[in-house]
Image (cartoon, rainbow, N blue to C red):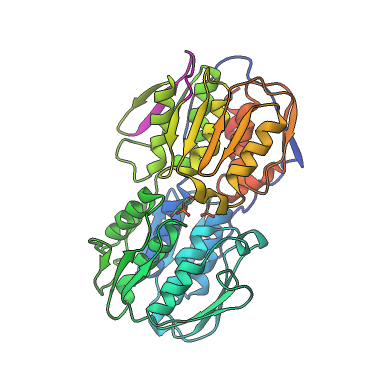
């Protein structure tokens, strides 16, 4: 066990441009993707707020979780990370007793920044939260307003509603209203800090909630650490230090399962069972609707391709991190695919609707941008160097096109380091 945070942050060693070689035969392979980013970052924060020592196993080691490890360290928790065994040992802190100045660099991580702001608002000390230029372009207004409403002082240090911000507590809690349609991460962050607010917290939503399964995941991880959420109400209380096992990442699994569907192979994702906490396992249901075979086991998920794929009309508001994956699959279907309900993904790492449509069009595919999603007409992609917009999901999704079409290259492949540093190594296991 090492006593710093020696986390491999990037997909080191990747070239500036990576050619993808089409598969010569359908793959039959079992792969265990790395730990879930979303569960790792929730468990890290709950553990950091629990008095005592918690141990996370199967945690993700990537740029986003490195950001959260750094963030909770800045709030005063102890973090000892061992990437070789996937174990993180966290020594919790009571932020309400923490008075010094602190600085958090959330890097590119939406979860880290949106989860840590309410936790930082528990501290009587002043915490500056900032991130990469990309994260500075993503919305924060709703959570900043909610923190003011529960008694914290919030200073927007640049543009109103954006990072960097300084937050000074303590946040007393009570009840607060916030929006649901921009990001579910605001609600998740408020809920995780809530038990340490003097009055607890009840959250009301002023607009429909997107990414609903992530809030259920928040409630499940909080429960594992001993805190109950009922009807978005949290009573004052304490987290319990816990040994916690992190599932493999279901969004990461979407690329591997999609690869099976488009190449007529069979891919089993180990460790993702039918009782997964992650909504993104539902991506397999979409592949099933398209004609792939899906076998669900207690501790694994298998997709088998082979027959023709039909286009689908699908609302992906619950599983929007897999929308770009579906765009790549849709290229190889027999009929068009329409994805709805995901207008909010224009505010992620990039405008994901505009980006995926632009890139597929550059490859000669008839892709159309809709206000709340996109439509992809099947076609034969021509050789193309895909731009990836510093968005890990652009790189991972568009590389799927190259498993069938010759001449596909991925620019800046190292951007996968945000959540899946070993992605291209795992993709190579398909050939
Ligand atoms: O809570 C989480 O762990 C996440 C929620 C989703 O974001 P939004 O709620 O902003 O859609 C998702 O896109 C992100 O990758 C992880
Ligand atoms: C949107 C994502 O991440 P985040 O919001 O946590 O930065 C993602 O991983 O696709």
Give whichever of 198, 84 is nearer the camera: 198
Q: Is residue 80 magenta?
A: no
Q: Is residue 370 above or below residue 404?
A: below
Give whichever of 418, 141 is nearer the camera: 141
Q: Quadrant of residue 45?
A: bottom left
Q: Residue at x 47, y 43 (%)?
A: 320
Q: Is residue 301 magenta?
A: yes
User: In this view of the protein, can residue 122 be seen by the observer?
Assistant: no
**231 displayed left or right of 316:** left
Residue 225: image location, x then y, percent: 30, 61
**198 displayed left or right of 405:** left
Q: Main secondary structure of the magenta part?
A: loop
Q: Is residue 47 above or below residue 98?
A: above
Q: Residue at x 47, y 76 (%)?
A: 76
Q: Which residues are magenta?
A: 299-311
Q: Residue at x 59, y 31 (%)?
A: 427
Give whichever of 52, 282 is nearer the camera: 282
Q: Is residue 258 above or below residue 242?
A: above
Q: Is residue 315 above or below residue 260?
A: below
Q: Quadrant of residue 145?
A: bottom left
Total labels drawn? 0
Q: Residue furthest front?
A: 371
Residue 160: image location, x then y, percent: 58, 73
User: In this view of the protein, can residue 41 be seen by the observer?
Assistant: yes
Q: Quadrant of residue 249?
A: top left
Residue 379: image location, x then y, percent: 63, 21
Q: Residue at x 34, y 46 (%)?
A: 277
């Amino acid at each position: 066990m090492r006593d710093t945070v020696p986390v491999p942050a990037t997909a080191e060693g990747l070239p500036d441009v990576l050619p993808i070689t089409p598969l010569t035969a359908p793959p039959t392979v079992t792969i265990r993707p790395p730990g879930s980013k979303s569960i790792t970052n929730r468990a890290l924060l709950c553990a950091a707020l629990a008095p005592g020592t918690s141990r996370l196993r199967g945690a993700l080691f990537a740029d986003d979780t490195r950001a959260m490890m750094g963030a909770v360290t800045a709030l005063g928790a102890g973090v000892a990370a061992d990437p070789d065994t996937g174990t993180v040992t966290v020594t919790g802190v009571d932020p309400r007793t923490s008075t010094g100045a602190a600085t958090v660099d959330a890097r590119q991580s939406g979860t880290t920044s949106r989860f840590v702001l309410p936790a930082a608002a528990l501290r009587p000390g002043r915490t500056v939260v900032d991130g990469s230029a990309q994260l500075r372009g993503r919305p924060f207004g709703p959570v900043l307003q909610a923190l003011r409403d529960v008694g914290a002082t919030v200073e927007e240090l640049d543009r109103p509603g954006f990072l960097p911000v300084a937050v000074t507590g303590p946040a007393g809690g009570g009840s607060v209203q916030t929006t649901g349609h921009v990001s579910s991460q605001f609600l998740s962050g408020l809920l995780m800090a809530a038990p340490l607010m003097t009055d607890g917290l009840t959250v009301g939503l002023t607009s429909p909630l997107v990414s609903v399964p992530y809030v259920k995941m928040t409630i499940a991880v909080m429960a594992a650490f001993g805190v109950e959420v009922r009807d978005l109400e949290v009573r004052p209380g304490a987290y319990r230090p816990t040994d916690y096992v992190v599932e493999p990442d279901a969004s990461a699994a979407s690329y591997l399962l999609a690869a099976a569907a488009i190449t007529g192979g069979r891919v089993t994702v180990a460790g993702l069972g039918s009782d997964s906490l992650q909504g993104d396992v539902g991506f397999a249901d979409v592949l099933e609707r398209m004609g792939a075979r899906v076998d669900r086991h207690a501790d694994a998920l298998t997709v088998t391709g082979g027959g023709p794929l039909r286009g689908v009309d699908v609302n992906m508001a619950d599983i929007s991190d897999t929308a770009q994956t579906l765009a790549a699959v849709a290229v190889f279907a027999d009929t068009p695919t329409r994805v709805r309900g995901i207008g909010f993904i224009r505010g992620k790492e990039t405008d994901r609707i505009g980006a995926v449509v632009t890139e597929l069009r550059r490859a000669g595919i008839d892709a159309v941008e809709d206000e709340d999603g996109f439509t992809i007409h099947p076609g034969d992609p021509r050789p193309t160097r895909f731009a990836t917009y510093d968005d890990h999901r652009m790189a991972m999704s568009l590389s799927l096109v190259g498993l069938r079409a010759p001449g596909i290259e991925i620019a800046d492949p190292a951007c996968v380091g945000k959540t899946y540093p070993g992605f291209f190594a795992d993709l190579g296991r398909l050939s």
